[in-house]
Amino acid sequence: MTQQAGRMARQLPTLNGLRAIAAVTVFFSHTTLFGFFADERIDDWWYTALSRTGSAALGFFFILSGFVLTWSAPDHEPNRRFWRRRAARILPNHLVVCAVFIVLLILVRGGAPLWPTVANLALVQSWIPNEFIFNGVNPPSWSLSCEIFFYASFPWVLAGIRRLSAAWLWSLAGGIVAAMLVAPAFSMAFLPAEPTYTYADAAFPQFWFVQQFPLTRMLDFVLGIVIAQLVMRGCGSG
């Protein structure tokens, strides 16, 4: 097989196309927050139908990200080359969009808040359980904050997972799913509730831990890596 044929065999156009479906789903889930419809009954129906689809789509997106990166990863690519490619893919667009938001905040509100702006530009806002920092400039970019962490750790995580046997991969997948199920109960039991801000019936710190904390969302990403390894090895459940 030639080098070009090898690259083509690693491409997943169908799965990559599913990224667009997930992104559109997230977009429409965000529209439920703004009350677009004059009829409150329609607005309530729109919220009930779509408000929670964004969370499911993001989980799928993160799992798919881990799967696609693992499937297409060269066997001996230098880490720096991987990081350069991922940075070139997301950072220019992120900085342009962030700059637009800063300009709009200056025009509309007379200025942009310092620390939320710094955190957003550096893509570290998802590590900070503070609503003011998190929502200060461009709230949707929290997912990029998680992705940057995923990309930074991917070469080492993949190298470790490649060393595992199929039996250990299945055990790891089961452990990850169990941790996903435990995370909401953990957040409700041990994190403070702030009645001034709730989303999806949870206070911000609790919701943040499950939905936006990079270490928690890393579970989705690693699950995608594990699934990709099982598929690539032709491992069935039997």
Image: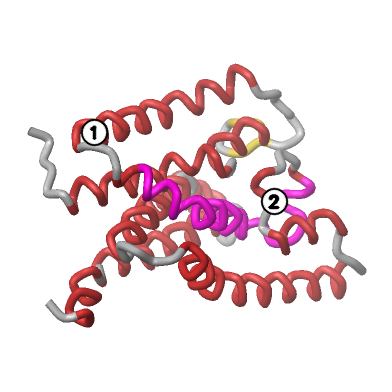
| 196 to 163, vertically: above or below | above
Q: Determine the residue positioned at 79% across, 47% down.
A: 132
Give the amino acid type for the residue marked by disc 2 in the picture: Gln
Q: Determine the residue positioned at 46% across, 67% down.
A: 82
Q: In the orientation shown, which residue stands out farthest toward the right?
A: 110
In which quadrant is the C terminus drawn?
Answer: top left
| 105 to 166, vertically: above or below | below
Q: Secondary structure at mark 2?
A: helix
Is residue 147 part of the magenta span, yes or no?
yes
Percent position of residue 137, x then y: 75, 61
Please tell me in which quadrant of the rendered image residue 112 appears: bottom right
Res. 38 visible in picture: no
Give the labeled residue for mark 1: 170
Percent position of residue 168, x then y: 25, 32
Q: Using the image as rendered, state which of residue 154 and residue 95 is in the foreground.
A: 154
In which quadrant is the N terminus drawn?
Answer: bottom left
Q: Determine the residue positioned at 35% across, 28% down.
A: 175
Give the labeled residue for mark 2: 125
Q: Determine the residue positioned at 42% across, 31% down.
A: 180
Q: Residues within 10 Å of mark 1 (few under 14, many from 20)?
A: some
Task: Please name the predominant secondary structure of the magenta segment in the image.
Answer: helix
| First-in-chain label (2 vs 1) | 2
Q: Is residue 60 shown left or right of residue 203?
A: left
- Magenta region, residue range: 132-160
